[in-house]
Image (tube, rainbow, N blue to C red):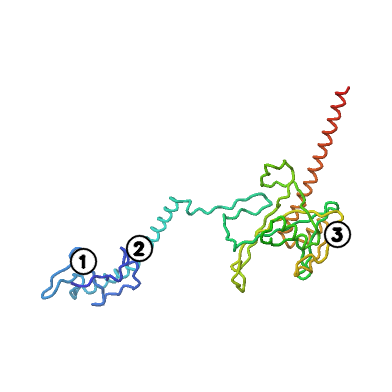
Amino acid sequence: MSEPWFTSSSVSGCLPSLFSTSEPQTPNGSDRPTRPSSRNPSTKSEGGPSQDRRALPLATGSNTSSASGSSSIAQSQPQQRSHDRQTIRTSNDSSNLAFRQRFPLLFRQPRPIHFSQHSSPSIPNSHFYCNDFLLGAGMVLIQPSTDKVVLVYESLREHWFLPKGRKDVGETLEHAALREAYEETGYRAEFLPLYSPTNQPSSPDASYSYFNTEPIYVSSLTWKARRVPRNGPGDLGGEYFTFWYVGQIADDAVREENTGMPDEQHYVSHLLDWKDALALLADYPLERKVMSMARRLWYQTLHIERQLAEQESQRVVDDQSDSAAQTD
């Protein structure tokens, strides 16, 4: 019996012809691969084994028609293979689509949530190992008596910035904010209570207050891997989270010298008007936004304090009137 038209090495799945890389050969005698007939797989020849009927030599008068028919078959095979490949691709796409429709939660990408106009859109739910994040604190320093704000100038790189830095091990964020403010500005500061809409709950033991000293902003910054790895924390990069507070300095505050680290001795702080300070931060949108919000909350706090004072004055007047009326 003649060899089949495919061998075991060329079979892949149930459609061997789709994965064959060789092009079909034109019929030229014995070079043409043979294929058993589905109707009559074998015929008996005189003095020899059974052979495929289409593999037997034909009569001389039918050579031309046989060659043309075989050529048409050979030309149609690449087209059939291309069609079969497209059929499988379409079938796979349909299967994937059906699977996605059946289990949508596995493939759903959460859309970012847009919060207030003062915040960036939401970030995906994430988690970071201690080696891959860093916590810091910054502060906007206000002098209420003069309505001015403190800004730091670095002479080496010639730029202005708000005091900020990394917190130390075991240090609270609040203490880090006050320490960084003192080291980089030379002013001893304290927190400034503001009327800010924080989401932090009040302590059950504390009395209700309109004002708080919680951070007004939290910013994140991604740092890249170090160019020269030192086999230490942060070699692969990480996320730097900074918590921004608002502080105040006294009316008679005096700037102290040489309060910074050795690489911060060229820092010089200045008391500036809000307009001038915001103009100097024009190239630093994040710190400009933080300072602008601090001013807005500070002015809002002053307005509410005046309203509360007026309400208290009116209450005292009403109480006095009621006492006078009862006496008469």
Name the amino acid, label 1.
Ser
- Badge number at residue 84: 2
Between marks 1 and 3 in the image, the one whose residue lies nearer the viewer: 3
Among all residues in the image, which is located at the extreme right? 328
Tell me the quarter of the picture where residue 247 sits: bottom right
Which residue does the image show at 82% across and 40% down from the upper left?
A: 309
- Which residue is more in the foreground, 38 or 322? 322
Secondary structure under tag 1 reads loop
Q: Which residue is mark 1?
A: 37
Which residue does the image show at 35% across and 63% down from the upper left?
A: 84
Name the amino acid, label 3.
Val
Mark 1: give few (<14), some (14-19) or many (20+) Cα within 10 Å.
Answer: few
Mark 2: give few (<14), some (14-19) or many (20+) Cα within 10 Å.
Answer: some
Going by the image, does 313 lie left or right of 37? right
Residue 147 place in picture, x, y as percent = 83, 53
* Label tally: 3
Going by the image, does 39 lie left or right of 110? left
Q: Which residue is mark 3?
A: 254
N-term mark: 1 or 2: 1
Secondary structure under tag 3 reads loop
Residue 114 place in picture, x, y as percent = 62, 50
